Amino acid sequence: MKMFFEEFKKGMKGFGDNLTIIINSILLSLVYIIGVGLTSLFAKLFRKKFLELKKRRGTYWSELNLKKKSTEDYYRQF
């Protein structure tokens, strides 16, 4: 009788582990599809590009345009 309960306990643990893997996979897939899918949809609707993939110049450094402001503006940045 004791052996039956030990084996039953092992079987239930294995069943619980397998069920956990299935449910977590389904939930994480839904979160990914909803999160990434909605973000992608809104980005396409508003024509937002998160990565600038086109290489315009020979460098990846962005232009700071430091000479367009007066010196006083730089003293009062915050």
Image (tube, rainbow, N blue to C red):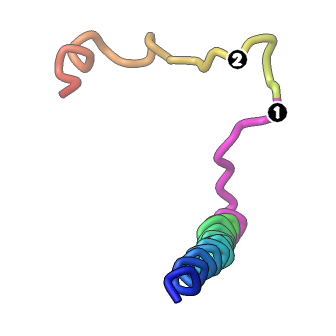
**Dominant secondary-structure state across the stretch colored magenta:** loop
72 lies left or right of 40? left
- SS at circle 2: loop
- The residue tagged 2 is 60
Mark closest to the chain's N terminus, 2 or 1: 1
Residue at the limit of the structure toward the bottom, as seen here? 1
**SS class of the residue under badge 1?**
loop
The percent coordinates of residue 32 (x first, y second) are 64, 67
Identify the residue at horizontal 58%, vertical 18% (top origin): 63
Q: Which residue is drawn at 63% across and 74% down?
A: 14
Could you tell me which residue is drawn at 31 percent across and 14 percent down? Answer: 70
Q: Give the range drawn in magenta.
A: 41-54
18 in relation to 40, above or below: below
Tell me where residue 34 appears, x and y as whole percent: 63, 75
Tell me if residue 43 comes above or below residue 49 in the rendering. Answer: below
Q: In this view, does 48 lie above or below 55?
A: below
How crowded pointer 2 is (Cα within 10 Å; few <14, some 14-19, many 20+) is rated as few
34 or 21: which is nearer to us?
21
